[in-house]
Amino acid sequence: MTNFLAIVNRYEFAQFYRFGYMFISGPDLLPFSGIDSNVTKTNLISHFQIKTPFEYDEEYLILHLYHDMDKQNKIQKFLITDLKSIYPLSSQAKQSIQERIDSRIKLEEPIFESLMPAIISNIQHNEIEMSISALWTIFDLDGSSDLIKNKIGVDHIFKGLEFRKEGIKAFQTQNQNIWSILIAYDRYEFFPNTTLGYFFDAGQVFAYSKQSNFENSKLFTLLKSIKEDSNTAVIISELENSEKSQSYISNTNFDGLKFHIAAPLYLMLKDDLRTSDDLKQSKYFTKSSLDYLKTFEDDFKAAVILLGSFFGYKKVYDLYYDKLNLSFFKNYKKNDAIENNAQTEIVKVKKEKAKTPEVEGEKENTTNIIIEPEEILPNVPIETTEVFEAVDIEFLKEELLKKEVETTIENSMNEIPVSEESLIIGQDFNIETFILDILKQQGNVLLTELGDKIKIARSDKKKMTNTELEREIIKTETLEVTEKSPKKVQRKTGFVFPRSN
């Protein structure tokens, strides 16, 4: 008999308890030699890295199993009698789980609780990577985020998040990296409630990193001299062209990454997203705003990395999934060319300059567009090649408008092919609607008599030639219209008035 540890989620344990058996694959079983074994602790941390991530520590349990290993099978069957002990991940998890399970079940003390920081750190690392990757896709950013992350330092980001988790304020930090302080930073000073205020914030973070007094600095004096309603471009220009800020700018340049730009952008976006449920509600999530932010290139990318690190995947995954066009979504847009391996028709458009007489000030007259469809299936010849003459759009609009105004029954009839061989199929063409639409333009038609004639025509034959249709229309040209008075429509106003007594 061998002792094993197995990590299972709470739902799996409930099913194990309900049915009395469960299957566990060999790689998921950890040989258990004792609580104090460093090997056991290391193995548990490694195994949690390949488990589905969790948000609350009550979602998983560690089972102590006692079982004869069947070496011939990679998957082992365990009975409920093989279960010796149940370990929750933390004291808080123990209390929460104990209230929800059979009161006869005993939960052991959380002897592996000391491993939780390492386990959570791994989950958090992946969470941040997923969040940054999602924002990269949402914002359509080019290149890799790795270069920017290296300039910031991933460890510095995690340190800042650790400060926030432990409740350590930015002004309480000492001898810390400026990016860590930025992550931990929250405003407590009375800086302008405008874009300029975020540049004050960045200056304050710099002062914290140098453990100096910001209000007594040249940078503070410079920022105070800038109009509070100045836009981002004006503020940056003032900073980069003033001697008072040169020490600040030179000391916060990280291989071309400009802290004096990246930090205010991050703080500005962070404040906006804090009051929004997701990115869609952000006032900056518009094409014009994003296009402008992208002009800051790597500095904006740095702000995005910090933003993803601060909020995590939970804040962005909804919009990210819309962007991905997931195949299991109801609104999935299927790509037939990929799904069905079908060949799509490729249309080649060639523009050929039309030959025109050589005259003084010769200019291009028109363009012939030749559309040559390629074969979709083998051995199917292409019979025709259509040639379309390009027409000036404005001229076309004027002609269409003119035609619409001058349309009469005579015009409409002339547009219909009058060949006896050309048939209008009753099932595909609504004769009544067609004639009525034309005659309404004429103004004087007895619609009742016209309707009777149409009924007779439709009952006598399923098909009608264009010539016969023309005759029916001509017969009705001299009829008079009997106009009906318009129906009175009662509309709801949206207001509810009390009834008078």
Image (cartoon, rainbow, N blue to C red):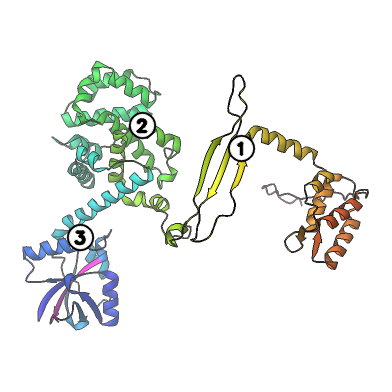
Tag 2 or tag 1, which sits nearer the N-term?
Answer: 2
| Vertical arrangement, residue 359 with respect to residue 167, above or below | above
- Circle 3 or circle 1, nearest the eye: 1
- Circle 1 or circle 2, nearest the eye: 1
SS type, badge 2: loop
Q: Residues within 10 Å of mark 2 (few under 14, many from 20)?
A: few
| Vertical arrangement, residue 180 with respect to residue 488, above or below | above
Residue at image x 27%, y 30%? 202
Q: Residue 276 carries which label?
A: none
Residue at image x 36%, y 34%? 294
| Vertical arrangement, residue 225 with respect to residue 107, above or below | above
Is 421 on the left-hand or right-hand side of 71? right
Is residue 70 inside the magenta stretch?
yes
From the top left corner, tell me how far across and down residue 416 is, in percent.
78, 50
**Badge 2 is on which residue?**
295
Mark 2 residue type: Thr
**Badge 3 is on which residue?**
49
SS type, badge 3: helix
